[in-house]
Amino acid sequence: MSLRVGIVGLPNVGKSTLFNALLAKQQAEAANYAFCTIDPNVGVVTVPDPRFERLTKLHTPLREVPATVEFVDIAGLVRGASKGEGRGNAFLSHIREADAIAHVVRCFEDENVIHVDNRVDPVADIATIETELILKDLDTVKKRLDRARRAAKGSDAMEKKAVALCERLEAALDAGEPATTVEPQDEDEEKILRDLFLLTSKKVFFVANVAEEQLGSADTDPHVNAVREVAKRRGNAPVVVISAAIESEIMQLPPEERGDFLASLGLEEPGLHRVIRTGYAMLDLITYFTCGKQEVRAWTIPRGTKAPQAAGVIHSDFERGFIKAEVIKYEDMIEHGSEQACKAAGKMSMEGKEYVVQDGDIMHFRFNV
């Protein structure tokens, strides 16, 4: 499944630096995966997963296919974007196409990097972006509400529900609250809400972009803590602290030198790994694996997916003709070392149509069409 995370923020906050570092990681560390730039500001990035790496070492397959996420570098929004300022309509449409949003916030002082408002104020920056998204959503909701009110004069029950939902959305957005604060009352309202494609209904996490010298004191940094306070009020949205400039430097180093460089900064892994994993987790996704000598592949599915639907991610015939799924837990595969050894130890189970796939399952599907 195609997963897309939009990188948003004001101009000069570090979005493009972060995006370029993500692409450098892809080119440097995943040469066996066909790197793809879909257009000048979209890139496909592998999801860091130690389980996938261990499974490939165990099976030494001819082909390795990791889980991936698309990151979209959306040009900096400006005040008035909801009215078309700074080509805002085009940029807002890019956000609408994203599954989740990584909101990059400037938390560093640097007189050589001009801030669009000539000051570093993370809370004000977040408010500027959120206001533009809310205003655009308010315009969308008002247009839908007008149509629904006209249609609801007849006997269209769905349009009457649209009126009720849009009135609640309008009230929330007018009060400066995102669409995520409005809960649909039933499946019909859920469908109406989905069809609106509201910008503020998307899941958001914050990327606090700091200078190198702030990395060691991120827990007490006032700018970072200001972002955390906003995130807390946004339903405890995740906050990832990185230095985009340092991430770029890390990705320029040969892989064998990166560990020492990270250690010198007091870091266990690149911040990019946390950004990628957070985007993946925000969409409530899990990974299952198929393993063999020909290929080890990570498959992405929503949490709670049952075995037939998980099989359908591979091919629709697998779901249509599903019979059983052979399942080995990742930990058992690592402990016993092979499918045959897991079978001998009684660590392979046969699961039916009601089995809910678990994160890390290693699966083989039996089907007949």
Image (cartoon, rainbow, N blue to C red):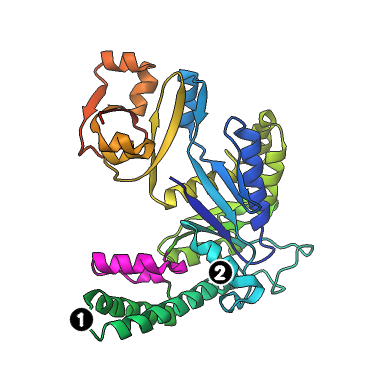
- x, y percentage for residue 324? 23, 29
Q: Residue at x 35, y 17 (%)?
A: 336
- x, y percentage for residue 310? 32, 39
Q: Amino acid at mark 1?
A: Ser
Could you say which quadrant of the image residue 366 lies in?
top left
Which one is in front in this view, the residue at disc 1 or the one at disc 2?
Answer: 1
Could you say which quadrant of the image residue 179 lies in?
bottom left
Q: Residue at x 31, y 35 (%)?
A: 317
Q: Residue at x 21, y 76 (%)?
A: 157
User: Which one is nearer the viewer's eye here, 207 or 29?
Assistant: 29
Eyeballing the image, is 108 above or below 48? below
For the residue labelled by badge 2, is the local secondary structure a helix, a strand or a loop?
Answer: helix
Between discs 1 and 2, the one toward the N terminus: 2
Dot 1 corresponds to which residue? 155
Dot 2 corresponds to which residue? 126
Bounds of the magenta segment = 179-201
- x, y percentage for residue 51? 45, 30
Q: Residue at x 67, y 34 (%)?
A: 258
Q: Amino acid at mark 2?
A: Ile
